[in-house]
């Protein structure tokens, strides 16, 4: 695949995630309130798109193995291009719920299938390429809230004109995604030799292709580690603002802690992906999880602005260490013709972790105090690290060339 095509894919990723993020941050909770919904309605509506990811990432990955990556990406682009305009028609909470579920299909399909395409096209330097693609999507995620907040501020947070501006901008970005994806070549799914016991012909029944993935201990344990780090991330992004208010931080200080973490992830992932290409992925995943558990414990203890800022940056680095290697590791362990299914499994499991983190953290915060939610993420990462260390198959405690020769 020419470099220019990879740049197109990264650009599409930036616009697609920008479109997805601006639809919810900060507009979505304000829109729910504008429609008369309370805190419970805000939580329910916010979780609907994540539920779409849990339900459809895996089937989308399977379909991309069967009918091709580009077709599935184009289907997701159609949703990106049409869903934003549906918000303009919403007058009731239940209508917003339907639109959020429909819009959630776009990211549920796009992310695992796009990652599968990167995995198909790059065996050498796979971790670095996946890191650059993730950085592009993170840039979209970072810019969207600022743009959305500015558009809402033009006419006031509660006025319909502000919401219309947000969702028209969201729709414009989605409309650009569709023709950009049509520029990508229709690359055939590869059939590289992998570590799974597939026959030489990947087509056949989907059970024949997906079954070995679900039974592969290395793939499932790696997915579990990704879910654990996103469990921690979900708690961080949900409860750090509350923690900041409790310890007396100003709004701009809380925002700086949150944005510094995203910037750290975006800057670090390509370099750490390249590091995993050179030195092996499983050990990097384990170290990142243990480091992340330390960061979550630190966030539960410290209370000053500077200490929370440093802890946020360190957590962003830990997330980068894990996620820059985990997706590439799953691609390494699967076969070219099943990268879509493998990335779909990863997408569904990581969304499950990202969704359950705030839910469990909220219950613990209500019953035991706010610090308990951060400590639960610390415990989750420690437990996941132990399972990963004891359960990961093969002699993976080696690095560099020796590791690559054992796969």
Image (cartoon, rainbow, N blue to C red):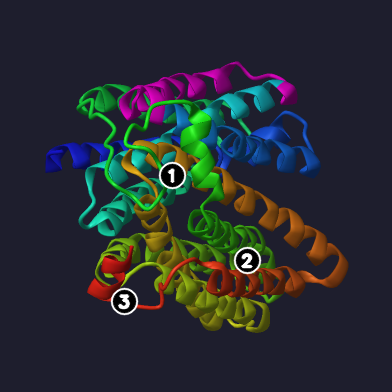
Q: Label 3 neighbourhood size at 10 Å, few (<14), some (14-19), many (20+)? A: some
Along the viewing direction, whichever of 51 and 334 lies nearer the viewer? 334
- Disc 2 vs disc 1: Cβ atoms closer than 8 Å? no
Compared across the picture, whether 297 is left or right of 200 comes to right
Compared across the picture, whether 387 is left or right of 81 comes to right
Q: Quadrant of residue 298?
A: bottom right
From the image, tell me which residue sits under label 1: 144
Q: Is residue 172 visible?
A: no
Q: For residue 166, which numbered disc appears in the image?
A: none
Secondary element at image label 3: loop
Q: Main secondary structure of the magenta part?
A: helix
From the image, tell me which residue sits under label 3: 399
Give the spatial CA distance, label 2 vs label 1: 20 Å
Q: Judge whether residue 71 is colored magenta.
A: yes
Where residue 275 sits: x, y (%)?
A: 28, 70
- The outermost residue toward the top is 89
Range of residues picked out in magenta: 65-94
Q: For the point 61% across and 68% down, which residue is it?
A: 384
Along the viewing direction, whichever of 368 and 4 lies nearer the viewer? 4
Q: For the point 68% across and 74% down, which residue is it?
A: 379
Q: Label 2 neighbourhood size at 10 Å, few (<14), some (14-19), many (20+)? A: many
Q: Nearer the viewer, mark 2 or mark 3?
A: 3
Q: Quadrant of residue 9?
A: top left
Give the spatial CA distance, label 2 vs label 3: 36 Å
Q: Nearer the viewer, mark 3 or mark 1?
A: 3
Secondary element at image label 1: helix
From the image, tell me which residue sits under label 2: 240
């Amino acid at each position: 695949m020419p470099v220019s095509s990879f740049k197109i894919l990264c650009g599409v990723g930036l616009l697609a995630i920008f479109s997805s993020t601006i639809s919810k941050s900060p507009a979505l909770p304000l829109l729910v309130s504008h429609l008369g919904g309370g805190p419970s309605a805000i939580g329910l509506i916010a979780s609907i798109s994540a539920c779409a990811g849990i339900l459809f990432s895996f089937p989308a990955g399977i379909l991309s193995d069967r009918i091709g990556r580009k077709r599935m990406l184009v289907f997701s682009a159609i949703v990106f291009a049409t869903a934003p305009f549906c918000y303009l028609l919403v007058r009731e909470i239940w209508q917003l719920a339907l639109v959020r579920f429909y819009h959630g299909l776009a990211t549920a399909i796009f992310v695992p299938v796009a990652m599968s395409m990167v995995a198909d096209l790059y065996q050498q330097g796979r971790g670095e390429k996946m890191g650059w693609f993730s950085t592009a999507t993170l840039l979209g995620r970072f810019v969207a809230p600022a743009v959305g907040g500015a558009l809402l501020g033009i006419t006031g947070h509660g006025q319909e004109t502000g919401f219309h501006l947000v969702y028209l901008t969201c729709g414009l970005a989605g409309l650009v995604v569709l023709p950009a994806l049509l520029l990508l070549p229709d690359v055939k799914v590869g059939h590289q030799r992998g570590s799974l016991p597939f026959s030489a012909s990947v087509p056949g029944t989907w059970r024949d292709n997906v079954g070995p993935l679900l039974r592969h201990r290395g793939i499932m344990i790696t997915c579990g580690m990704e879910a654990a780090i996103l469990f921690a991330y979900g708690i961080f992004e949900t409860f750090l603002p509350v923690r900041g208010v409790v310890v007396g931080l100003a709004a701009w200080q809380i925002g700086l802690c949150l944005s510094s973490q995203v910037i750290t992830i975006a800057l670090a992932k390509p370099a750490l992906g390249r590091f995993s290409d050179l030195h092996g992925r499983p050990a990097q995943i384990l170290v990142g999880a243990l480091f992340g558990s330390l960061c979550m414990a630190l966030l539960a203890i410290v209370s000053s602005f500077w200490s929370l800022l440093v802890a946020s940056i360190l957590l962003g680095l830990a997330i980068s260490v894990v996620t820059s290697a985990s997706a590439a590791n799953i691609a390494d362990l699967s076969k070219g013709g099943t990268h879509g299914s493998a990335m779909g499994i990863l997408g569904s499991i990581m969304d499950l972790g990202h969704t359950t983190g705030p839910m469990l953290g909220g219950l613990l915060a209500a019953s035991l105090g706010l610090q308990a939610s951060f400590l639960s993420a610390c415990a989750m990462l420690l437990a996941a690290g132990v399972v990963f260390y004891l359960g990961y198959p093969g002699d993976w405690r080696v690095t560099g060339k020796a590791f690559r020769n054992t796969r």
